[in-house]
Image (cartoon, rainbow, N blue to C red):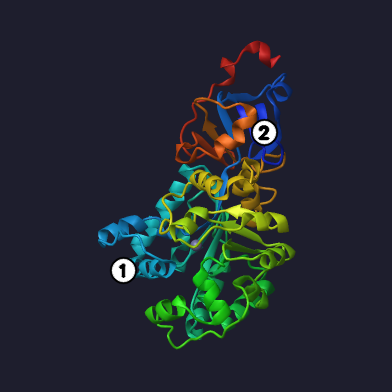
Amino acid sequence: MTLYLARYLLPISAPPIEDGALLLNQDRIAAVGRRAELLPGFVGEVVDFGDAALLPPLVNAHTHLELSHFSLWAAAADKSHAPASFVDWLLYLIDIKRGLTEDELAASLQDGLRQCLRFGTGAVGDILSTASLSPHYAASPLYGRIYFELLGVDQAVWQGALLRAEAELGKDDFARLQPGLAPHAPYSLSSEALAVIFATARRQNWPLTTHLAESPQESELVERGAGELLERLYPAVGWKDYRPAAANCSPTAYLDRFGGLQPDNLLVHGVQVNEADCRLLADRAVTVALCPRSNERLGVGCAPVADYRAAGVKLALGTDSLASNDSLSLWDELAAARRCYGAQLSPTELLAMATRNGAEALGLKGEMGTLQAGYGAHFQLLPLRDPPRLAELEEFLCSCGCDTVPSALYLNGRERLQAIGGQKHGELDAAERR
Ligand SMILES: [Zn+2]
């Protein structure tokens, strides 16, 4: 047994604790409480982190780690410009990605996995478009899911991708990252593909993730069967012969027609949603991962979090890829969410989105996301040079952004960043241990 002490402890499942203590029994949490409750009489190893906040690892519910070297590739191709619109950005992404080798994508993925750890992330919902790269996750201590991307309107193409993904899902070498499918988005799959993929996933109990209601252009394509995606994206990717019928409804209602709003489909973005969509998402018990920095970068607007809250939709947080973001730090994302959503989401709610809600959406309830007895021994440690008062702690943590770098990240009871500089129990005041 080891007892970890810190000035502040954030269980997430309960209010923050001053002078907190976390008791680990090998790879599980045995108890969470105050130092004054758990330290007296304790005879095992004690590690005192001093002025620091101890809290669960963050959960990046949506990213594409294979694109982590995007800015390097863009610079090498002399294409480091900012696309003017969402469709310009899609064409830009396709253009850069087309020239990459599998080795370049593999190096980028591995770097992305390392960056997540460095920013205190313990679990990811990661989308992989190159299925053959899946063995590269095996050495990472990260938890979460690898979602194999499915994309295309040509039957032979999406069926081929589905067969390859099915073969991947049958493997058992994913360690702590479990496989699922990512039917990409309503605008990038034919109606037939959506129907077949969602029916197959439901039958097989496969976890899913789908980009939904990201841009106004997606709404225009779904509702009216027209617009910039049809006119510019489709010809550029060889889909000019496919013309979707006007569905006369929102992307959310459209996805529901195909059975896409399954509870284990983690939806991403959810910017172009109305109040009726929010009620439908709440009824279907799905989680929506918000990506405020990506939305801002691509100029698609801001998710209506007040409507989500009013309807009771579960929300998580993701960075999306480094093709539309500056960092894989969820601490940066929290600071952006605080700025974008203002007082509509409290710091307590934001921290829950970035930990518990994301973990539950990735199937990690009971394992990660909160500090509770019985959960896995996963936590991170943030040093506090100038500690705020307890009442201001959550606001402080949601405001620091890139200044927030953990000094330690424990996953499955093992430190993953560096040797820890905490005091050993012999250095504690002996009187306090009696
Ligand atoms: Zn994405």
Instruction: Looking at the picture, tell me which residue is in the foreground, 164 or 394.
Output: 394
Q: Check contact, mark 2 vs mark 1: CB within 8 A.
A: no
Residue 24 location, x and y as percent? 65, 34
Which element is circle 1 on? Answer: loop
Residue lying furthest top: 431
Residue 6 appearing in the image: no
Q: Is residue 136 above or below residue 424?
A: below
**Is 48 left or right of 139, judged from the image as shown?**
right
What residue lies at 37% left-to-right and 64% top-to-bottom?
84
Which residue, given by chain and number where applicable, does mark 2 sit on?
16
Identify the residue shown where x is 61% and y is 58%. 304
Residue 372 point in image, percent of width and height: 70, 39
Q: Secondary structure at mark 2?
A: loop
Observer-nearest of 428 and 78: 78
Q: Is mark 2 within 8 Å of ligand 1?
A: no
Amino acid type, callout 2:
Pro
Would residue 96 be seen by someone viewing this image from the given angle?
yes
Q: Please, what is the three-letter code of the amino acid marked with disc 1?
A: Gly
> Which is nearer the eye, 185 or 130?
185
Quadrant position of the N terminus in the picture: top right
Q: Position of residue 307 (x, y in %)?
A: 67, 58
Residue at (63, 74) in percent of width and height: 255
- Whole-percent x and y of residue 402? 45, 40
Q: Which mark is residue 226?
A: none
Is 117 on the left-hand or right-hand side of 370? left
For marks 2 and 1, give the one nearer the viewer: 2
Q: Which residue is mark 1?
A: 99
